Amino acid sequence: MRLSDEENVLAANAAFYDAFARRDMAAMKRVWADTHDIACIHPGWGPLHGRDAVMESWQRILGSANAPRIVCAAPRAYVMGALVFVLCFETVSGNHLIATNIFVREGEAWRMVHHQAGPTADAPPAPEPPEPKTTFH
């Protein structure tokens, strides 16, 4: 079964947060675009432009003994052809942020070109309960 663009980009978004949570710089580099310009705005930082600056920032964050623990919640993808953005909540050390992650297609994969996170007064919505399992006789 072939996954939809929305499912694929949500998987790419999950890979970003997985790389962050595991402090895996090699995985973080794979998430980001190679052939498109990239940018990033970390909470409290100014904008970073270009792969070198963005990757250096992630190296500093992921390599720090004080790197925050992060959990992504309620991701929602907005597909617009070759461009997709994901809005989601981040819980970092008990504080809630709202994030925008923008992806473009590079070959067969969705790659991040922009990440921005900032504080929000809202908490992530409670996860939806799983669908009940139906038993057929």
Image (cartoon, helix red, strand yellow):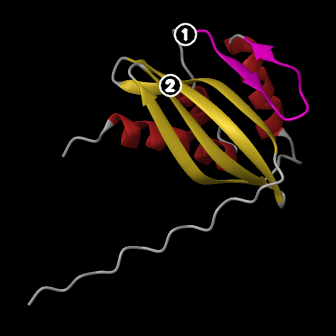
Q: Amino acid at mark 1?
A: His
Say whether marks 1 and 2 touch (CB < 8 Å): yes
What range is drawn magenta here? 36-49
Q: Position of residue 92 (x, y in %)?
A: 79, 53
Q: Which residue is mark 2?
A: 111
In the rendered view, tell whether residue 28 sits above or below residue 126.
above
What secondary structure is the stretch in magenta mostly built from?
Answer: loop
What residue is at 29 percent from the left and 81 percent from the top? 133
**Quarter of the image where the C terminus is located:** bottom left
Instruction: Indicate whether residue 39 is drawn in magenta.
Output: yes
Q: Quadrant of residue 96?
A: bottom right
Give the Cα separation between the discs numbered 1 and 2. 9 Å
Q: Quadrant of residue 117?
A: top right
* In the displayed structure image, the side of residue 39 where residue 13 appears, left or right: left
Q: Which residue is mark 1?
A: 36
Q: Amino acid at mark 2?
A: Arg
Give the mark nearest the N terminus, 1 or 2: 1
What residue is at 65 percent from the left and 34 percent from the top? 100
In the rendered view, tell whether residue 44 sits above or below residue 72.
above
Residue closest to the eye, 105 or 136: 136
* In the displayed structure image, the side of residue 98 where residue 42 appears, left or right: right
Q: Secondary structure at mark 1?
A: loop
